[in-house]
Every structure is written in C-alpha cells, then in structure tokens.
Amino acid sequence: MPQTWGTIAWEGVTARVPAEWSLVGVSGDAQKGYLRVDSSESSVLEMRWSTAQGKPPELLAKARELLANLDKSCRKQGTKLTSKIKNEGQAVAFWWKTDRVGEGRLTYCDKCDRVLIAQVIYPCDEDFSDTAQSILRSIRDHRSDGLVGWALYGLEFAVPPSYSLEKHTLMSGYLQLVFRNHAKRLIVERWGLANSLLGDDSLMDWYRKDVLPDIKGFRVEFGETEILGHQALRVFGWAAGIRQAIKTAAYSLTLYTNPKLLTGYAWQCTESNRLYSVRTTHDEGENIAERVRDLIRCHK
C-alpha cells in the first residue's frame, strides 16, 4: 500500500489515489464524462459517468454488458478472459483477468442521477488488489456540502453547482479552470515554480504583468490581505467602459444581470513554491471568490 495519497476530482467525481499518480485524460461534462489517472508505472484508474435520466439503471445488466464487450474484444485478439460479478446491494463489483487484471465497481446515485463505472487495471504479476480496492472504495460522485469538487495536480477546490466548466488549460506549470454562471465568471489558476516566475518582482508587480491584462472591462484597485498564513493580494474592480455598458443593456432584456463587480485574490505559497489566483465577476453582496479561496489547499 502506498504511504501517501492524493485526491483527483473532476465534475464532482472524486477518488483518492497514490500521490504519484497523475491525471492524464478527461473529456465530457457533468452529464457524461471520462477520467483517466495513470501511475508512474503501468497501473490505471478509469472512471466513466453518465446521467440515468431519472430511471434507476440495472447495474448487473450493465456489468454483464461491459464484461461481454471485453470478452468479445479478447476473442478477436486471441486472448482468454476470466471474469466475476458480485452484487453488493447499492453497487455491483466486477473482476476480470487477461494479460492484465481489472477490478471495478458500478454505482448509481439517485441524488446525482448519475451512473458511475470505475475500474483499476494493473499487471498480473503485481500484488495490487488491496490498493485497487482502497481506490475504488474512496470514489464519490458528489460532496456532502452540495458543492462540486475539483482536484488535479495538487490543486483542490470546489465551486457552487450553478457554475459550469467553460474551458480549461492543463499544463505542467500552469492550470486554469474557467467556470460560468450565465454572465458571471469564476477563474481559478495555479502556477508552478513561483520563485522563478516572481524573480525580484513583488506579488503585485507579477500580477499586474501576468494576470491583469486578462481582466478586461473593469477598473481595479489592490489591497493586502493574508491567506493560509501567506501574504496575499486582494483585487477589487467595478465595471467600466463602452463594452460593459453594451453588455449591461443586453442583459437587461433577460432574466439575468451583467455583473458590475470583480473580486480576486492571489498569493504565493512558499511551502509548495506555487502561485494561486481566484477571481470572479459578481453582483453586490455575493462572496463566491472568498468561498472558493477558502476551499483551496495550497500546502499540507
């Protein structure tokens, strides 16, 4: 069993995996998606989810279909498949073996209305079953507080369910996830190698140079604060300019408003040598930036 574990989460689907495992592939959205996490060697965690559209699914039938398709593929390749299925009440467990071993679970959550299929695949010559079962038992399809969890490459946070992922950038030294709630936007970013990025610049100098150019349509002012024991930057802005006036006029014809305010935070975590930024556009009285900021774990 590994000594240290980390969290992987996408669209609220969460798993605990050995710390050295990395997210290598994601696709889809909250209704239908796929996630893959690889070890540094040859073990893999795959998770697929889809909405059941209000009708509780036959998990046993789905498990049989999955293994039947795998058996068909093995026959084409001239390999033999051995498999087992076990009904565990609220879940169905399955096991298969070819030139590799797969251990998995199918679950259905009536709160999420989501079917989740997860499996850990590993080499036959590895004593990996205990770790595989620990991973599978850790999987959750939603948080208990109603927020939607996200965790990758050491960045862990959650957002309100009204915010859906609009786009993302996943690079070794830079992560950006952009969420939208009608006209409101929420942007969470993380940079690696903070010391190299900052150089001799202050946090404010860096922010003005690297982040501020992406903030358009708002006049901003800066202040100092503290986040998780780190000196931090607070950014406050208000809508300005012709483009914002046009947007405000356009949204006045709908049920939604064009947000007039912007709030953001940025800080350097010296323990992890990373830079973090959270910013939102919002209406008066909302504190989304603070809620998301307080859920980020920048160091242990």
Image (cartoon, grey):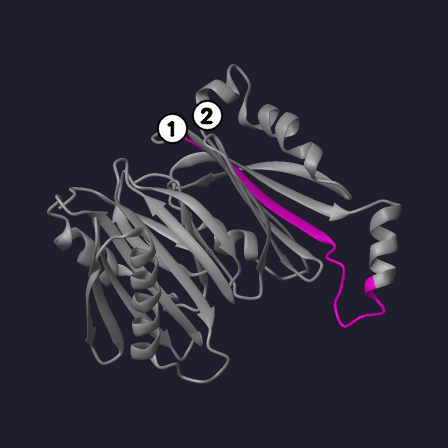
Image point (65%, 44%), residue name: 236
Compared with 191, 49 (above or below) is: below
The magenta stretch spans residue 66: no
SS category of the residue bearing label 1: loop
Image point (54%, 22%), residue name: 202
Q: Is residue 265 visible?
A: yes
Which of discs 1 and 2 lies nearer the camera? The answer is 2
Q: Is residue 256 left or right of residue 201?
A: right
Say if mark 1 contacts mark 2, CB within 8 Å. Answer: yes
**Magenta span:** 251-270
Q: Is residue 134 left or right of residue 127?
A: right
Image point (44%, 56%), residue name: 34
- Front residue of 130/281: it is 130
Figure quadrant of the C terminus? top left
Q: Position of residue 90 (x, y in %)?
A: 26, 79
Q: Is residue 211 left or right of residue 104?
A: right
Q: Earlier in the sequence, mark 1 or mark 2?
A: 2
Image point (41%, 61%), residue name: 48
